[in-house]
Image (tube, coloured by chain):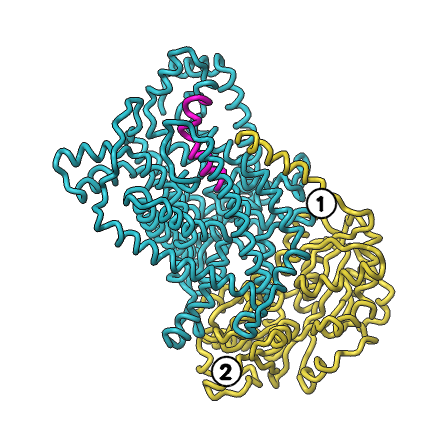
Amino acid sequence: MNQTPANRAQTVRRLLQDPTLLTSVVILWVLLGLFVLYPLAWLLLRTFTEGGTLTLANLLAILKDPNHRQSFWNSLLLAALVGLAGTALGFFFAFTAVRANLSKAWGTVLDAACLLPLISPPFTTAIAMIFSFGPRGLITYHLLGIKGFTVYGLGSTWFSETLTFFPIAYLTLKPILSGIDPNVEDMAFSLGSSRWRVFWTVTLPLTVPGLANAFLLLFAASLADFATPLILAGNQFPVLPTQAYLQITGLFDLKGGAVLSFVLLVPAMIVYLLQRYWVSRKSYVTITGKVGAQTMVKSVAPWARYPLLGVCLLMAGAILYFYLLLFYASVVMALGANHAWTLQHYRVIFTEGLKAIRDTLVIAGAGMPLGGLFGILVGYLVVKKEFPGRQTMEVVSMVNYSLPGTIVGIAYLMAFNDPPLVLTGTALVIVACYVFRYSPTGIRATVATLQQIDPSIEEASQSLGAGSGTTFRRITLPLILPAFFAGLGVVFIRSMTAISATIFLVSINWTLITVRILENITELSLGPAAAFSVLVVAIVFVVIALIGLALRRFRAAGAVEVASILGG
Amino acid sequence: MRRWILFLPLLGILALPAGMAAAADTVNAYSIWPENWARPMFQEFEKATGIKVNFVRFSSGEALARVIAEKNNPRVDVLFGGPVETHAAGIKEGIFEPYKPPAFAALPARMKHAEGQWVAIADDPLVFMSNTKFLKEHNLTAPASWDDLLNPAYKNMIQMADARTSGTAVTRIFSILEVFGRDEEKAFAYMKKLRPNVQLYTKSGGGGTLPVGLGQAGAGIFFIVDALDTKAKGYDVVVSFPKEGIGTAAEAIALLKGAKNPELGKKLIDWASSPAMQSLFATYKINFVPAHPEVKVEASLAEVLKGAKIFPIDDAYAGANRKRIVERWINEVLPAQ
């Protein structure tokens, strides 16, 4: 934003007069500097220097290689396809859940179906896919009798990533859809619009910032995911994150991997900036201080309710099938060879795997509240407050999310392994990695929610003499609480399930369940891998349910109506 | 509710020391051996010496990358297991502290580094492994020659490891080079001819054994230890050897330079390179061939190996050419459609 010097001086003065704001801004910048900019500086140093001099040679060497160029286009194609399909699917689920007047029970079923892919490591679905769709796949061969079906490639990777990431779109879109006051739609109805027309001209346009957010998040998630393509893409469809991961882990080539990821960062940033400036030109205020009469949602015709629900349940059924297969693998001796029932795999994870379970719980437990708090603080300051460097703060807070996780992990490893800051081998470095990598979901949810809240509500509080701290606590916080819980939930879930960054940060002292799962899969111990996955799903389910319970008790009167924690 | 939230990080902090506490007699190791084989060995070591082994498992490429990244501040004392070319690459990075355990003199020349940068704890030959049902369906017998794998019946049905990450793959490529008398042109021409039959190059050496076991792939090239384990789990597979011969890699152990517990690390190396550990392979049904000449090869393993033509990979030749050969493989074999 272009500000005149006089304006700028004014914002600086206002910042200095507001100690709460000043302290928050300073603390956030110190944290962002330490855990986002500092490792990134290390990464760039590695990419653009050679023997102490600046050079573009590293970058040019990668760009000249036709295989790497092909991987680059493949990655963009995959990310765009996953973004589109995932956003569409997420919107479909969210719309059905919020606008179809379903009973609470059906809403819970949809929430649960979306939760499953979100709360297990992505590559676990990929493994179930391999069992189902190969030359001897349960579905392709044993059910349909197709011979020589090839599972590896774009199609299966797209399908698996869409299934894994669409709940992010659902999480983003549901609170926005439920935040649209049905009265707004009622106005259109009373002016004679059909339901179809109301959907296209009122409901859908109001969710545009949410759709853009969802697309961006899915695009970034796909660009950062190396595990699914590692298992499913095969050698015909190489993608950059996997290439970068292999470059680093296999060829010991930190520099080459860093350069590959730098190439990947460019499209991620372009999409982010496009979305940012496109969305920011529109206004989406639908929650005003003026209370309208409570009204029924009428946007979906009663007859259309069940087809919508039917399609959702079909998808949910597909998801459920994959996880049942996984569960089955955890309770038989060896899937495909010896189907005798056994609890042996669970015995293994609760004896030998106990350390990984404890470590993961401690790290996720510590990261969850920190990440949730960080998310709403940044989101709130960025949307509602004026201070120098505001927009830079938002961009910086998104960096670790946009960067492929492999690179965040390697950057952390390079930055925090040697003095002055030796943090590798500690739990802190893993917690920090999760917080700064996964709180952007909370930030975006907060931003999207705040963009719907009329500033007059807060202005009223301030004109009555409340400071910014009080106004935040008493007015804004209850309104953005759902976003807080979304952020908190996502950080916890990701701490339990993510692998791409932290695979480099696990150490002899602190290990993670996900790393053990991937190891178990490469060690051919499918049983323990499946048992671990089932355990992760169970733990996250319980914690999310607890948060949902807490949210219902804590929700302030008059806050945005949200069905459950997932809606936040 | 708010109090409840605040309670969580507190819980986390309280639990921190639990994870950090380490007994005085603990040696730290990165294990390249899969956990289900490393763990029983380490438990036996603790039983024998009272020293606990704290370890994490990584595949060879990852373990080496990690040790190099941590060079100035090593987190572990010992690098345990992994094909010897991994250790050969590590010598160039100056990450090891030479050490000659008591068994050093007894080991044959190819089972130790002359200056003691590493010593071998096992030997691991490559094998062909095929799915029995797949073979029957295509009227094939188990492949008995490298040329058998070129049969179009295998089109898109063979899995083997990716040379970017896997030591198994590097051993395989050097086997093929040996078969063609180190004539690189002929060896690469063969690998390119094999390429259309390859369904997938897997990240880890054993990655393809489960697909072959299930019949998702027809055949593959693996270390014997992975292949026989697949068979033992009940998958219907058959192990065979090419008549031209196939390579075997020594599995090595090494002490890291700057290790925090060098004395304990040395004790682990003493034990692992001696018959004390290697005679336990049979007890735990781990199909490694012992490196120490005094330990007998277990009978059923010896039966599988009988008559097979197996040659060692020359670690000096492999170490010197590894980077170039792997790069050539990435550029010429991997992308070929």
| A343, A439: nearer the viewer | A343
Q: Which mark is residue B133?
A: 2
Q: Which mark is residue B72?
A: 1
Q: Label 2: how many residues lie within 10 Å, few (<14), some (14-19) or many (20+)? A: some
Is residue B211 depicted above or below A413 in this figure?
Answer: below
Is residue A413 depicted above or below A234 in this figure?
Answer: above
| A93, A80: nearer the viewer | A93
Instruction: Give percent across and percent down for residue B235.
Output: 57, 76
Chain drawn in yellow: B
Stretch in magenta: A472-489
- The chain identifier of the residue carrying mark 2 reads B
Q: Is residue A476 magenta?
A: yes
Instruction: Give percent across and percent down for residue A467.
Output: 45, 15
The C terminus of chain A lies in quadrant: top left
Q: Earlier in the sequence, mark 1 or mark 2?
A: 1
| A290, A138: nearer the viewer | A290
Instruction: Give percent across and percent down for residue A152.
Output: 43, 66
